Image (cartoon, rainbow, N blue to C red):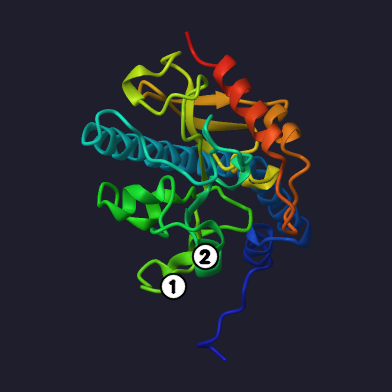
Amino acid sequence: MAGLRSTSPRVVSKVASRAFTLIDLLTTIAVITVLIGILLPSLGTLRETARRTVCRSNIRQIGFGIASYADERKGLIPSSIFKADASSRRESELQEMMTLRLDTMDMQGRNVTSAWDGLGLLHEGEYLRGPKVYYCPSHAGLHPFSRYAPVWGDRNSQEIVCNYQYRGAGPDGSRYLFRMEPLKAALVSDGMRSARDFSHVVGANILRADLSADWYPDPTRFVSGILKNGTDDGNPADSEDVDRAWRHLDSSRPN
């Protein structure tokens, strides 16, 4: 018919040459896969860097809370039933000093009047009220914030455990914040109840006795190795191991 015009073979050839072939598609997918493989580790590193920053902020806020608490008590920092003093006949349970609040049964067994203990006294005294500040975003152990969130506002005494290890005194046993020696002694760190409680694994944010906060790098996982006897099935590290970890963090203090 006069109104119809046939398509030129040359035009068909040009259209076909511009179309994607199966090889082109597979090549594109392969390139995208390689790029994702390259970028994912970087994204993971960026996420962990952000988490470390949040963790350090938490550590600093805990330091401000300790300073405020001590300022009203002639320099004394919060006490803990898990930290035996020189006059006590019982042994210290340093591995349990991630505990903020005791459960009812533990209170009866220890004959205490307040359920709050250690860093938990900062919450009880309203020096540090926000619950999330006690939890590290990199924590991968048994004590995430989600586990304890339902009982923070509960008036009944139920156990609350945080992600930060409290020392309760300086290396010399002093509980007076402004008299602790050395000034760069570690006072708060990642949890040490087990190796998994040491949240960042290859290092930790440390609060020092002078209230400075710094990052302790541990690429060889030395501290995690010290705490390896602590497992996630309910068996904590030994008190001696935790004390050894504290002394190591003291020796790693910045100049």
**Helix, strand or loop at mark 2:** helix
Q: Judge the density around disc 1: few (<14), some (14-19), many (≥20) Cα neighbours within 10 Å.
A: few
Which residue is tagged 2? 108
Q: Position of residue 234 (x, y in %)?
A: 72, 58
Which residue is tagged 1? 150
Describe residue 128's horizontal placement relative to residue 233 as left or right: left
Q: Which mark, by number, is residue 18?
A: none
Q: Position of residue 9 (x, y in %)?
A: 69, 67
**Between 137 and 133, which is closer to the camera in this rendering?**
133
Describe residue 168's horizontal placement relative to residue 129 as left or right: right
Residue found farthest to the bottom: 1
Which quadrant holds the N terminus? Answer: bottom right
Q: Judge the density around disc 2: few (<14), some (14-19), many (≥20) Cα neighbours within 10 Å.
A: few
Q: Residue at x 39, y 59 (%)?
A: 113
Identify the mark nearer the N-term, 2 or 1. Answer: 2
**Between 64 and 146, which is closer to the camera in this rendering?**
64
**Helix, strand or loop at mark 1:** helix
What amino acid is found at the position of numbered circle 2 in the picture?
Answer: Gln
**Between 78 and 184, which is closer to the camera in this rendering?**
78
Q: Is residue 63 above or below residue 208?
A: below
Q: Residue at x 25, y 35 (%)?
A: 73
Q: Residue 227 sits in which quadrant?
A: top right
Q: Nearer the viewer, mark 2 or mark 1?
A: 2
Q: Residue at x 59, y 27 (%)?
A: 246
Q: Residue at x 44, y 67 (%)?
A: 149
Q: Position of residue 123 (x, y in %)?
A: 32, 53
Q: Residue 25 sits in which quadrant?
A: bottom right
Residue found farthest to the left: 72
**CA separation in Å, label 2 and label 1:** 23 Å
